[in-house]
Image (spheres, rainbow, N blue to C red):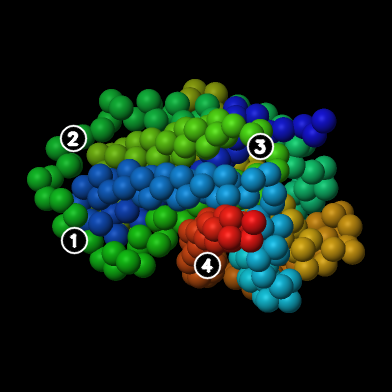
Amino acid sequence: MQEKITPYQTAIIVFMAQSGIVIFSLPRLVAETFGLNGWIAVPGFGIISAINLWLVSKAYRACKGRTIFEVMEAACPKSLLYPIYLVIALTWALLGCMVVKEYVLIFQMLSFPTTNPMVFKLSISVLAFLLLIKGIYTISKAITMFFWLFAWMNLLMLFFLPDLELGRLTSFLFHEGEHPFKGSIKIFTAFLGYEICLLLFPYFDASDKWHKSAQIGNMAVVFVYTSICFIGYTFFSFEQLRHLTFPMLETLAYIRLPFIERLENLLYSFLLLNTLDTAVLYYWSAQQTFQRIFPRLSDKRLSFIIVLCSFAIAFIPKTIKEVEDWLYVVGNSALYIAYLLPLAIIGIGWISGKERPSNG
């Protein structure tokens, strides 16, 4: 009997896939996009992602035990699907690549300013490859373990409660925001990751428990993101918030322990686990998609090619700003995939369902 991913693991996978290093810059992005009291808008993005997850659950029912690739290939010739597969696979591979590159650039800036960041990128790529070749069951178990090594950091928000000033929350709502469309895309990129559930359909049981668990994981991310943005708005002035590149790193610097200096460096190191999880999940998704184009390549060989090419591409962006530009473009593509792919599966299932009675 094939092993299944449990609802408990599903919730953790969604949480770890959605959360990431954007957590450190999110309050600034929200302040730039929505202006004063912009933190109130964050749950709105959670609602959008919850609707998207609901569409994914409908796509799961339409698949009826098949993979999304089998459903699409039953409706369209493979030759027409190959370009679509290529775009999807490249998008997911690049997302995994750029998430890691942004992490190592910030890590270099904090701890090793004279070291080439690609040294750290190489180390993470090796770890990602070793985990990737083990398959999704081992990946899901590793993510569950990494979650408990990472999740405790959310409790650090309690350290800031005595220093929060509610007086910084003015009576103005969404005032002085700029570039709402572009900024909203950047913010929503922080909520992406749940779309990986589309590829996990064969590993879920027949019930809808996985969908409820995925929604719980999504709600947990929304709570964390909203809390962090609220802390940013009440810990810093609005002008400070807009000009600090990584506001949450600045807040971590305020935590003082008698036996540790530069605590923010240590805490940032723990985020490696989350970054590794996100990258591996996107690499695995890309590998599953590329497998439909190159069925003769083994999983290990295809995984090696994906990780190697991602490492080579990571040499192109040199600065955090360039990586953010890449993430904006790739995030745009991932956003379309997250919505259009389940809609396409639902549409194919609906059409095939209408054809069966007429053929009978």
At a point 64% along the width and 56% down the height, the residue shown is: 360
Question: Along the polypeptide, which appears first: circle 3 or circle 4?
Answer: 3
Residue highlighted by disc 3: 204
Q: Is residue 102 visible?
A: no
Q: Are marks 2 and 1 in contact (CB under 8 Å)?
A: no
Question: Along the polypeptide, which appears first: circle 3 or circle 2?
Answer: 2
Q: Nearer the viewer, residue 237 or 67?
A: 67
Is residue 232 shown above or below 102? above
Distance Cα–Cα, label 3 vs label 4: 26 Å
Residue highlighted by disc 4: 333
Is residue 190 shown above or below 82? above
At a point 53% along the width and 37% down the height, the residue shown is: 211
Mark 1 burial class by Cα count in 10 Å: few <14, some 14-19, many 20+ = few
Q: Nearer the viewer, residue 204 or 270?
A: 204
Labels 1, 4: front one: 4
Residue highlighted by disc 1: 176
Question: Along the polypeptide, which appears first: circle 4 or circle 2?
Answer: 2
Could you say which disc has been placed on residue 166 in the image? 2
Mark 2 burial class by Cα count in 10 Å: few <14, some 14-19, many 20+ = few
Mark 3 burial class by Cα count in 10 Å: few <14, some 14-19, many 20+ = many
Q: Could you tell me residue 14's position as x and y percent?
A: 55, 40
Q: Could you tell me residue 149's position as x and y percent?
A: 62, 29
Distance Cα–Cα, label 2 vs label 1: 19 Å
Q: Is residue 44 left or right of residue 283?
A: left
Q: Are marks 3 and 4 in contact (CB under 8 Å)?
A: no
The amino acid at mark 3 is Phe
Q: Are marks 1 and 4 in contact (CB under 8 Å)?
A: no
Question: Along the polypeptide, which appears first: circle 1 or circle 4?
Answer: 1
Q: Could you tell me residue 346's position as x and y percent?
A: 53, 56
Distance Cα–Cα, label 1 vs label 3: 45 Å
At a point 60% along the width and 41% down the height, the residue shown is: 274
The amino acid at mark 2 is Leu
